[in-house]
Amino acid sequence: MKRFLLDKRALLSVLLVLFALTGMAQTTFSVGDLNYRVNDDGVSVTVTGHVNGYDATGDLTIPASVSYEGHDYVVNTIGNTAFMYCFYLTSLNMPNSITTIEEGAFSYCSGFTGDLVIPNSVVTIEPSAFFTCYSFDGDLVIGNSVTVIGDYAFDDCNGMHGVLNIPSNVTSIGLDAFRYCEFSGITVDPANPVFDSRDNCNAIIVTSTNKLLTGCINTVIPSTVTSIGENAFCGLSGLTSIDIPNSITSIGAGAFSFCFGLTGDLTIPNSVTTIGAGAFFQCSGLNGTLTIGESVTFIGDYAFRQCSNFTGAVSLATTPPELGNEPGWNCVVFEYFGYPILTVPYGCASAYQNSNWYDPFGLNGFYEFIEAEPTAVWEVENNVAAVYPNPTQGMTRIEAEGIQSVSIFNSLGAKVFESSVGGNAFEYDFSGQAAGVYLIKVEASKGVETKRVTVL
């Protein structure tokens, strides 16, 4: 009897599985050019692909509803990898019934052109939904109901050059969601509780942490931002200059990698402590001086690799920052860096020489270290005034007994600053001036003296 009961249960299980499989087979159908699957609610469907698969061509228009065997269904989901690798589709129109665009739904659809409009009905855009759809050449319009934008959702959609607006309901933006997208501007709805674009900065900032998540070619980093996120500006070939404010403490991995259009000098401010791996990887257009701030303690692998056109290099850190040495990377922070001679603070050449900053061939580091002039005080025989630090990257302090006036001249003899002063000390911020040599004329109770200061 027990054996018979077990056999009946086994038979019942098999029948249930067969019934389920039969039911599943009945839930898929094709209408027109598209394949569908009925959802569990029985009244809506998911688009699962094109009847021609990878060979699909032309315009792709997804209907708001579809009828099959006497049933009307709402089309509310575009399925996982539904149109992946459909290279020959040229335009996309989605209805205002879609609520979810699943993972990889349109990834590698590199033939799409024009605007990409995410309907107002959409709530979730899953990871890699539009990954490598690089031929879209219009605007990206994100519907007002979107709450989640997944990892890599629009990664490598580098044909988009319009203004990106993040609506108020978006509360989650995934890793590298907009990497390589060269937007001309970025705005965040002021009602958004998670993100902002303060001070018209043209960037997405995480409000609670003051982290810049995504930038564009016209971003101006606000002084209230404290960190630059991973790949925040990655691949923006149209980015030609960037000022990193003194509020920044960390620069994330790959933050400015592949920004080929950056030119001139690059100054890492004294506030920065860490520079992530590959932060400026292949920024080959930078052709001035790299100045590393005095507070930097760590620089990740590949951070300045293939920055091949720099014509100067300065470190203001008295202790050589630790260089990333991940397994298999061989500490290639400065491999193919354009300038193999590093200026370091006075008395610090030996420390750099005996660290992994040194490479006798200059292929993966620096082969010569030159000490800057003492940063303490420059004084002459009459000992009227003291000026420090020197060289400076910003604020300079002038000390003298009974200072009456201070005048500052650039190397061409043009006066860039003049002011009456009372007291024994005065500070001037050179951060708004170009790098070079300046003369500071100090009139004090003991006489007049001119000091020379180098601005990095």
Image: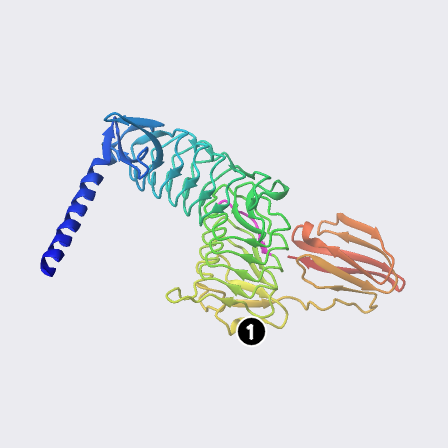
- Camera sees residue 107: yes
Residue at left offset 48%, top offset 58%: 303
Front position in the image: 334 or 276: 276
**296 left or right of 175?**
right
Residue 171 higher or lower than 427, as above or below: above
Residues in magenta, as a range: 261-268
Residue 381 locus on image (x, y percent): 81, 69
On the rendered structure, is 49 left or right of 8?
right
Q: Which residue is mark 1?
A: 351
> From where the camera sits, is residue 63 visible?
no
Of residues 417 and 68, the one drawn nearer to the viewer in this rendering: 68
Indicate the quadrant containing the C terminus: top left, top right, bottom left or bottom right.
bottom right
Residue 70, position as x, y percentages in the image: 25, 25
Dot 1: element: helix
Asked which quadrant contains residue 2, the reply is: bottom left
User: By what rule are the colours in the image chosen?
Assistant: rainbow
Image quadrant where one finds the N terminus: bottom left
Q: Is residue 286 magenta?
A: no
* Secondary structure, magenta segment, majority class: loop
Residue 415 or 107: which is nearer the viewer?
A: 107
Q: Position of residue 242 (x, y in %)?
A: 57, 47
Q: Residue at x 51, y 37 (%)?
A: 164
x%, y% of residue 60?
A: 32, 29
Q: Which amino acid, mark 1?
A: Ala
Local packing at callout 1 (Cα closer than 10 Å; few below 14, some 14-19, many 20+) is some
Query: Residue 363 vs residue 385: left or right?
Result: left
Residue with the most extreme right position: 445
Residue at 20% from the left image edge and 38% from the top image edge = 25
Q: How many marks?
A: 1
The vertical placement of 231 against 158, above or below, is below
Q: Is residue 142 left or right of residue 4?
A: right
